[in-house]
Amino acid sequence: MTVGEFVGTLAEKTYLTEETLFFSFSVPDTVAFQAGQYVMITMTRDGLKRVKPYSILNPPSAKGKIDLCVALVLGGFASEIFRALTVGESFTFRGPLGHFLFQEAEQEHWFICVGTGLTPLHSMIQEFVPQYPQKKFVLVFGDKTRPDLLFYDELTEWQKKHTNFTYLPVLSREKWKGKTGYVQQHLPANIQRKIFYICGLKEMVLETQKLLLEKGVDPQKIRMERYT
Ligand SMILES: Cc1cc2nc3c(=O)[nH]c(=O)nc-3n(C[C@H](O)[C@H](O)[C@H](O)COP(=O)(O)OP(=O)(O)OC[C@H]3O[C@@H](n4cnc5c(N)ncnc54)[C@H](O)[C@@H]3O)c2cc1C
């Protein structure tokens, strides 16, 4: 897919949690990408210009838009711009970029993530779960408390609707009916015929990779996207 520059205009901004924002940018219909890729956004603040990477939340089949899911960091350069952003404002985007891509040949796909690490995997789930009813998809998704779990209702509905999709939410700071602890504690015992996609902050990604390698997973079957 050709990497290019294009303008994205903010069409919708919603708080998903106190710290996490959903953005929908209108972009030309000609913009094409693959599920799992990201864009670089040029941002200017106090005369300083920076270019920041953000994964794409929507599936490629949803054309004419780029949705983002952003965790706000207090005082962060981009975070403060995102916090103040209003509908109608525009940025220059560059992309699509990245090699964190769905491996179609594999039979069983395990997505492991925390917080906004869900973003590129959300794009893959929406694109490929309905497209491949005979493949198996599992999402192990962690956060601190139940209200922190992004798209909880949507993912719960997806599990009911698609028998090839299993949603395993994990809470680290709240007791509930579901799984508790960290996502790394909920990796499958049997690693045969599975590919793993891990996305999020460095520590979680490296720790999960280490555990999977210790279980004997082929390094080629571990795909990673690190946000830091
Ligand atoms: C390929 C790629 C895709 C990404 N996609 C997403 C995405 O979809 N959603 C998303 O929210 N982020 C994503 N990120 C991270 C994002 O690019 C920024 O790093 C993040 O939004 C913080 O930027 P900032 O300018 O607000 O903070 P900065 O001004 O860069 O940093 C401010 C302070 O916050 C710390 N910090 C930086 N990032 C984080 C973080 N994520 N959590 C906690 N502390 C942090 C820094 O160490 C620093 O001390 C992605 C990163 C990469 C490399």
Image (cartoon, grey):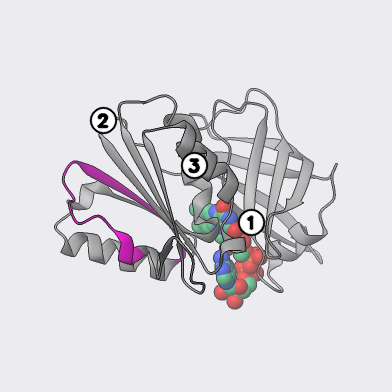
Q: Is residue 199 magenta-colored? A: yes
| Residue type pointed to by label 1 | Val
Most foreground residue, 91 or 128: 128
* Residue 133 x/y as whole percent: 36, 26
Query: What's the CA distance linking mark 3 and mark 1?
Result: 15 Å
**Mark 2 neighbour class, 10 Å CA radius: few under 14, some 14 to 19, many 20 or more:** few
User: Is residue 105 toward the left or the right of residue 59 in the image?
Assistant: left
Instruction: Decide which of tag 2 and tag 1 comes sooner along the chain.
Output: 1
179 relative to 50 in the view: left or right: left
Q: Is residue 182 magenta?
A: no
Looking at numbered disc 2 in the image, what kind of residue is underneath it?
Ala
Q: Is mark 1 within 8 Å of ligand 1?
A: yes
Residue stretch in magenta? 184-201
Tell me if residue 94 can be seen. Answer: yes
The picture quadrant where one finds residue 99 is top left
Q: Give the x, y percent position of residue 10.
A: 78, 42
Residue 206 falls in image quadrant: bottom left
| Residue in the foreground of this view, choosing between 145 and 195 | 145
